[in-house]
Image (cartoon, rainbow, N blue to C red):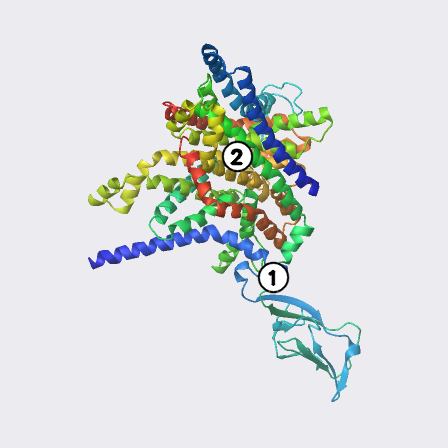
Amino acid sequence: MAAQILSAIFVIIIGVGGCVAYFWGANKLVDLIFPSRGVAGAAAIDNLRRQGLVRPWLFVGPAMIILTVYLIYPVVATLWLSFLDRGGQHLVGFANYEWAFGDREFRNSILNNIIWLAVVPAACTFLGLIIAVLTDKIWWGTIAKSLIFLPLAISFVGASVIWKFIYEYRGEGQTQIGLLNAIIQYFGGQPQVWISLPFWNNFFLMIILIWIQTGFAMVILSSALRGIPEETLEAAVIDGANPFQIFWKIMVPQIWGTIAVVWTTITILVLKVFDIVLTMTNGQWNSQVLANLMFDWMFRGGGDFGRGATIAIIIMIAVIPIMVWNIRQANKETGGH
Amino acid sequence: MAVATGKSFASRFGVHIAVLIFVAIWTVPTLGILASSLRDKDQIIASGWWNSFSSSTQTEAGRLPPASAQVEKDGKFVLAGNIFGDAAARNISAFGVKSAAPTQYPAGTTADLGDGVTLQLNADGTFVMSSPKAFEGDRGQRVYYASSAPPKFTTDNYNTVLFSEGIGRSFMNSLTVTIPSTVIPILIAAFAAYALAWMRFPGRALLIAVIIGLLVVPLQMSLIPLLKLYNGVGTFFGVPSKTYLGIWLAHTGFGLPFAIYLLRSYIAGLPREIMESARIDGASDFEIFVKIVLPLSFPVLASFAIFQFLWVWNDLLVAMVFLGTEGDQIVLTAKLNALLGSRGGDWEILTTSAFVTIIVPLIVFFSLQRYFVRGLLAGSVKGG
């Protein structure tokens, strides 16, 4: 273990030192090859121009290489692999896609993903907005926001343990130590094994993600609400609008752009949700989702890379519209710079 | 007027209550595992954690001493003593002699067991059993009793998980993965961000668009080709394919788009005059970056570092694909996932392990919340 810590420290030094050495050394090298000081005027200007051509690439070079190896190449390779067999040896055409749409588990995952997509972003945004509005009105709002924000720091696995403990079921006659079943029993209801109830168990898993992400929505929306000009609210009050009208007709339309950003960010997160399903049910009792199914196929029976890649492509296809929208938005904003 | 004030008071009161309910829902689950991790493991299953501070009632079974311990007294044969023996006394509320009715008699009463045999069991555990005939056999009478134990808090669970369940080792593994994965991307991203913000070169707009596109590419797209690549590299050079170096680079790669995006939007917002006056003074881009941009960008570098730290510490997927699941490589999240499978019902182990897993992010989060929120706002409100 000591060796492990030493090697980690060593890597930090090598990594950071290497980066510094690269950037500093490459910069020096450019200065040496194209000197701009101590040479005659015309040559200096010429060399400065050459420096300007080379230097940006030295700065972005390392990032471009890593991005290419870790993101750009894999996207192309995954697309290619989805047309190959399990070992990635032979071309099989659309066989993996045909398999996917005929597979019961895959169709169940698609259905569940659609439910997740319909429920989680909406719930997070709605709850986040309500909490943001409410906490703005009270003196201990900052503390309240901090506490609601806190689950965002907790890992999905940690959150799954936390909620599994809440959903814990113990046989009849035993003391219920799960909070949910204890409350149900207190009010005379029948304790249930929540995470294995077909269909409804999806919602019990979604609650975990909603619990984590509402804080995110709250913080972003709260800052957007602060940006609403006071005059518009005052004008509405003078015109005799009630709080609900102010909320829906004055506040919400003005932060529409931010709501869209929060919504799409959580949508992407939902498409990638994996940890919660793996740790809570591992896809049993009809609670499978695409990301967990993909992980499963990567290793099931030695791994089927063709089917795994196919599922990844399906997730990617769902993300593409958001990606295009993001790039367009960014282009609009940075157009002037 | 009076009506109006009353209404506004009621509505303000309602806001306080509503926020209180939200705060409760968002904190109680975490409190549950914190409280449970500090409780005695027998008490965790005997009562819900919300009863941590009240005595818990358990039904247990014990055995009276064998016939050899009897004494003859007034023509009767008597067995007497304390059911807890030398162990700490607990408070008995009821007892019984049949497993079907373990709490048939209240403590302190004398139970008639038939044939003139009587048994009295008191709240403090002392008992008197008497019979007109001599007791026989070397196995004493079985007695069931409900006892309540006072609340008991302990740090034993932490000792167990840290030193015998392997959580301590996993904690070190998680640190080993997280710190280099947080530090390495910062410099690489900062240089790229500066170039994309302040240097003119062909293809810059395209590069920015590509990076924004990569922001949302699901991690799942990268896993299989990279796994194949790592396996290939491992076989080719005869080295293991699952190494810390591999996961450091993977996390660096996956973190870079967000890092460049976040840093670029901040660095692009720095005042143009500073850059220009430095340039007029003869500073090169490298000098401007190191002496002006880097120090000014400290807040955004801190934001990114916190993000990346939390991301990597909390990650399960990348660790499960690129690291082994043995003791010397398994990280906290993967270990916790494994414990959920192998120690499914042992809540003292699970709650304690979960708390060890989340304590570092919580500390980072609470001490550096300001930077975290700033990064969140910069990262998603602009462009998203």
Residue A333 in the image, given as x and y percentages of width and height: 37, 26
Q: Nearer the viewer, residue A215 or A308?
A: A215
For the C terminus of chain B, the image quarter is: top left
Which chain is home to disc 1? B
- Residue occupying image coordinates x 40% and y 22%: B280
Question: SS class of the residue under badge 1?
Answer: helix
Q: Residues within 10 Å of mark 1 (few under 14, many from 20)?
A: many
Total count of labels: 2
Tell me where residue A73 appears, x and y as whole percent.
57, 22
Is B337 on the left-hand or right-hand side of A42? Answer: right
Residue A190 locus on image (x, y percent) = 52, 55
In the picture, the disc for residue B43 is 1
Label 1, label 2: how many angstroms apart (C-alpha)?
A: 38 Å
Badge 1 amino acid = Gln
Residue A261 occupies which quadrant of the picture? top left
In the rendered image, the vertical position of residue B59 relative to residue B319, given as above or below: below
Q: Which residue is mark 2?
A: A272
Whether residue B19 is visible, yes or no, is yes
As drawn, the residue found furthest toward the bottom would be: B74
With B281 as the anchor, is B341 left or right in this view? right
| Residue type, mark 2 in image | Lys
Q: What residue appears at the point 67 percent right and 47 percent down from the top-left corner?
A: B166
- Compared with B228, B364 (above or below) is below
